Amino acid sequence: MINSTQQSANPNNQNQTNNQNNSPIDTEIEEIKKLFQARQINSALTRIEEAQRKFPGNLEIIALKLRIFRATGNTQLALDIAKSLVKDSPNDPIAIGEYMLSNVVNGANKEAIDTLIKYCESSNDELSPYIVNSALELAYYLLLQGAVGTATGIAQCLRQIESISDRADNIIYSASSASEVPLLIREFSFDPNYPDNFTAKKEFEHATTLISQMRWNEALKSLKSITKYATEWANLLRNIAVLHYWLLEPEAACDTLKAYAACPNIQVEDAADIEALRLTINPGLLGDPTYILFAEYKISDANTALEKLLSSPYIYSLPFDQRVFVQQSQVPPKGIFKILNRPLLLPEIEITVDNIPSHVAICMLFGKETDKDARIEIIDLPKSEQKTVEILLKQILGDLLVTNLSKTETIKSHPRSYELAILRLLFTPNRPLSPEQQEKLIEQYLTTTFTSQWLKTTFESLGNNTPINAAKEPAYKIRLLGLLSLLEHDVLDVFDKIGTNVVNKLRAILEYPLIDTIQIQGTTDEEQLQFLSGIPAWRWYRLDFKNLSDLALAEGFQLMHVINESRCLPKLAQEVLNRPLTSVDLKVRMLAYDSLIKIKRQNNELEEALKLIDKAKNESVLANTIDAAWYMHEIPIRLLLNQPKYVEDAINYVVNRYGNNEKIMREFYSLLMQLGIIRPGNKDTFEESDLAGEGKLPPNASQQNSTKLWTPDNISSDNSQPQEQTKSKLWTPD
């Protein structure tokens, strides 16, 4: 196993344990680190050059140089140097660690993970502390890039090492709660729990040991040697697919999942979800990709172009904050616009699903700059709409538009079925609709336009048949149900109940069973918890939570809060708050308020969010617990509602009540600086004029997390220290 007694340092302070004596080279390295941490990059690089002349060939000094290069964007130069290091010192942990990290920052994730696994498989069970830290840093990079499976796999192995177990657990937690990653992917993990009567249990246990040592290729070989026993335990094939996925081999993972879904002991619904997982891992299996472009067109006169764009019914001007561009050292555009597929509606015309405009692309108009011509930049442009947009812009701008395309590039691609579900309906402030009216239009669009087009789309996974034709062939049943599962759990899940209604309409047309509510089984806490543990997380939104016991409800809510499952989290949170005040643990109840407030704010239901904040304040007072978090929730909402007096009152309350609490005030002032209410270095005062104005938040403020202070482990009485976190019985990092 990975040696759990070895020391490990911060990634920026590796090999510290090997340099306890203050030798000249140790002193040099520490001085370089100090310069780097102070962001004195040029001085640090100069010092490195001097150190290399004093200590030629020292890998620690070279590693510091590579870290500076990566941090300052010189990633290719870092990789070039790392390649030469590993060529000259193929077995040195520093060379291997730097090569690994230089690859991942350049997008060569497969080479990075292969390098790590190859080293682990040749290390005789003992890993260098430098490799341990580099592997942890690699997991962070992979997590940021969306490779949550591999990041989680690495972290699960590293959490055996006590000195870094907290950091490894943090990666696992972050991967579990990464809501931008489909839940089918986040829940695709290795299952070590084989059945009691499994014939190959000894071989399987050996493979799990190899996995814990990050000897994943060896483990894969071991598991493949016992695939004949998959008839006893189908999850054996699933585990093989997980390892392929961790090794960044999506095609092999999908092939293995296909075999897994075909096992005779797999239920139809499970097989459909497996097919959906395959399509999520490799969307290319759907075929017919839609390419999304960036395009740039030169114009001769930006000011005249602005006038023409603003006067066109096919152009909708978007409000934007110029400070966003200024803060990023970019020249702000003169305007940002949505290009529409039909003209804006006149005030007297009723809005219907048949006449509401949709945007086909977004464009930004820039004036002439020192090194750039006046231009229009078009983003989020489907390639299929490029000619249409060019024709429309030519009609609007005439000779102002240079006919030759200045620049075009493909930004991304996704299957056409995904593109069909992207909601581009234009709801404008000058034609205000209630949330109910907007929801009705969205549902009408999805149940008419979307369903009609989806049923006519050909899918490669269906043998280039349409769903209507494939439904007539029994051989395509699982694949077609997999497509419907993909819609349910990935494509349409953001629409919650509407998405379910759309999928059920498609199921009815294709003559498949409808999605229905899952009833809770069991009457005791233990029985209900056992039942919940057997339900895949992506199906929890279908559960009837009203019949859960208080304990099972609290446990289930905490699990979904960790996973950040958007469809069932608000239902669970609301059910927690519906229970009597003393029936659910206070920490869980406060967490439910926190979750619902954030959801209401994200949905722009600001008044509803404020009602919840008032209730949370009252309950905090009754329980004699810290209530600062609710005021931190309130302040950005009051700013959005242009209510400066409420903002001032909230600030004064927190300052007067918690002014002596260093932790609270540090987080509080951080929030105020994020919102632009106070400026860095001016913590002690704020001007009322800072709160006035047009009720607009500073750049990105509406997305700031206003409750950084509050976490489940610090609900405690006023002035007390944070308590130990209550852990869910349904979820642990491993």
Image: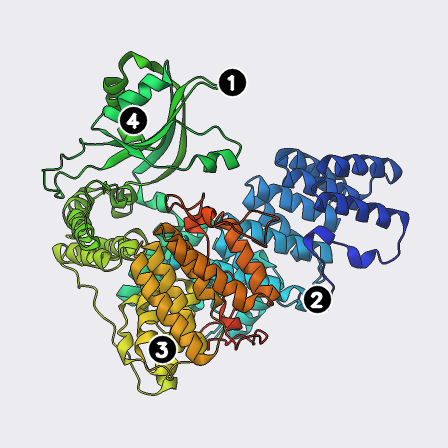
Per the model, the C-alpha gap separating discs 3 and 4 is 51 Å
Which mark, by number, is residue 523? none
In the picture, residue 358 is in which quadrant? top left
The residue under label 4 is 386
Which label sits in the foreground, 2 or 1? 1
Picture residue at 86% right of the left edge, 35% below the top? 53
Which label sits in the foreground, 2 or 3? 3
The residue under label 2 is 3
Q: Earlier in the sequence, mark 3 or mark 4?
A: 4
Q: Earlier in the sequence, mark 1 or mark 4?
A: 1
Which mark, by number, is residue 371? 1
Per the model, the C-alpha gap separating discs 4 and 2 is 57 Å
Q: Earlier in the sequence, mark 2 or mark 3?
A: 2
Q: Which amino acid does the dot numbered 1 rest on?
A: Asp
Q: Are marks 4 and 2 in contact (CB under 8 Å)?
A: no
Q: Which amino acid does the dot numbered 4 rest on?
A: Gln
| Residue nearer the viewer, 598 or 540 | 598
Where is residue 258 drawn, in percent x and y?
36, 56
